[in-house]
Image: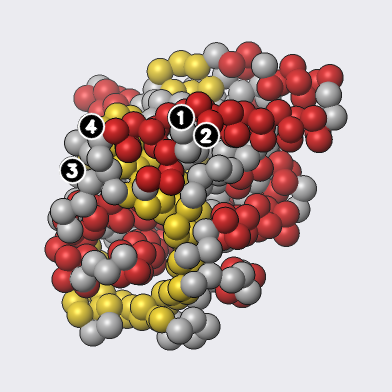
Amino acid sequence: MVNQIKKYFPSFFLDGYHFFLALFGAVVYFFPSRQLKVIGVTGTNGKSTVVKMLAAIFEEAGCRVAYSSSINFKIAEKETPNTLRMTMPGRLKIQKFLREAVKQRCQYAILEVTSEGIKQFRQRFISFKTAVLTNLSAEHIEAHGSFAKYRQAKLKLFKAARETHIINLDDENSKYFLELPAKKKIGYTLEGRGGTETIISGKIADVFGPGLIFLVNGKIFKLNLKGSFNIYNALAAISAALSEGISLEICRTALEKINGLPGRLEEVISRPFKVIVDYAFTPNALEKVYQAVKPKTGRLICVLGACGGGRDKWKRPVLGSLAAKYCDKVIITNEDPYDEDPGKIIEMVAVGAGNKAEKISDRRKAINFALKSGQENDVVIITGKGCEPSICLAGGKKIPWDDRQVVREEFKKL
């Protein structure tokens, strides 16, 4: 329906359509967010992880929690996977979700908030108490028109949440968020930066073991997660929890219980070589993932594509060049082409990868090829989809898919 409206009506009409749906959803479900403490988490990377971490902390503190992320939905004890293929649900769905959270006597609702969602007014008529910024790098540039407009969309969440702002002080874009008014501003940092009255300061102690060890205001934290970027995610969650009066000790207990997240640096095979699946599809996230999993001995073999067809074409060769920089073997394959020619997408990624590029359009065959190439001490990293349950093709068609399950199936054939 929206696509038909786009064809025949100007953009201001489409904005009105989205706004009306947002208002209609809030009215139909009686403005449910007014009965909840709503926390919005936004940024380019790390949103789902922060949502999960924060929910775990609140639950450890004895609170009833609802949350919505690109991975799943949870309302109190009930958890369901997110099969919508959109991080932030539509206006009616999100209001229904919040109403159900109220019915289940939840105190907190934690929402992963995207720039595309904000552009379509999905955040409107939701009473946000707190806004959290993870980080900001180039993404959705073609959809928004420029990086400045992309950032401006993120700023709208902070304008809506006037109670508490949680900001990554180490991000170069933090200054724009610090300018906005709020009753309480909390900044978190690993680099000792200032900018807010309250600062949650972290310090990396060890990132070379099976997990992460870091300090927060002098207290030792241990995470059963890989990737030093997850320390920033933990600091964001800790900062939001502290703003609600939850102790640092409860934060530590909750975070140490988390043993990985679906499709986020998820180790699917451990021997004779490691096979890891991750959601990363932005240059910034992909580079950090490669840095986190690159073995000291052995090769790094990667399987990658490019995020959905028809969007952010600029980053396709960038993704390819990053793969060539960090990986010993680069296999480029189909991901979510939508209505675009998947072969052309693959070629654009391959330009960046140069002579390292091995092009295999069938994703299952690409994964099989990567697994056959693996040897002892190697790491095979498959990025772009994580735990997504489908591949999106032309004409709105979807085929069931799970990178993790395909890895297990193809590994058995070796």
Q: CA distance from mark 1 to mark 2?
A: 5 Å
Residue 286 in sight: no
Q: CA distance from mark 4 to mark 2?
A: 23 Å
Quick check: marks 4 and 1 in contact, CB under 8 Å? no
Amino acid under disc 1: Tyr
Q: Mark 1: give few (<14), some (14-19) or many (20+) Cα within 10 Å.
A: some
Q: Earlier in the sequence, mark 3 or mark 1?
A: 1
**Of labels 4 and 3, the one closer to you:** 4
Amino acid under disc 3: Arg
Residue marked by disc 2:
26
| Quadrant location, the N terminus | top right
**Of labels 4 and 2, the one closer to you:** 2
Residue marked by disc 1:
29
Amino acid under disc 2: Ala
Q: CA distance from mark 3 to mark 1?
A: 51 Å
346 versus 315 height, above or below? above
**Of labels 3 and 1, the one closer to you:** 1
Residue marked by disc 3:
271
Quick check: marks 4 and 2 in contact, CB under 8 Å? no
In this picture the colour scheme is: secondary structure
Secondary element at tag 2: helix
**Of labels 4 and 1, the one closer to you:** 1
Query: Image point 80% across, 30% down: which residue?
Result: 13
Q: Earlier in the sequence, mark 2 or mark 3?
A: 2
Secondary element at tag 3: loop
Image location of residue 195, percent across then percent down: 52, 83
Q: Which mark is residue 78?
A: 4
Query: Image point 41% across, 81% down: which residue?
Result: 198
Q: Earlier in the sequence, mark 4 or mark 3?
A: 4
Q: Mark 4: give few (<14), some (14-19) or many (20+) Cα within 10 Å.
A: few
Quick check: marks 4 and 3 in contact, CB under 8 Å? no
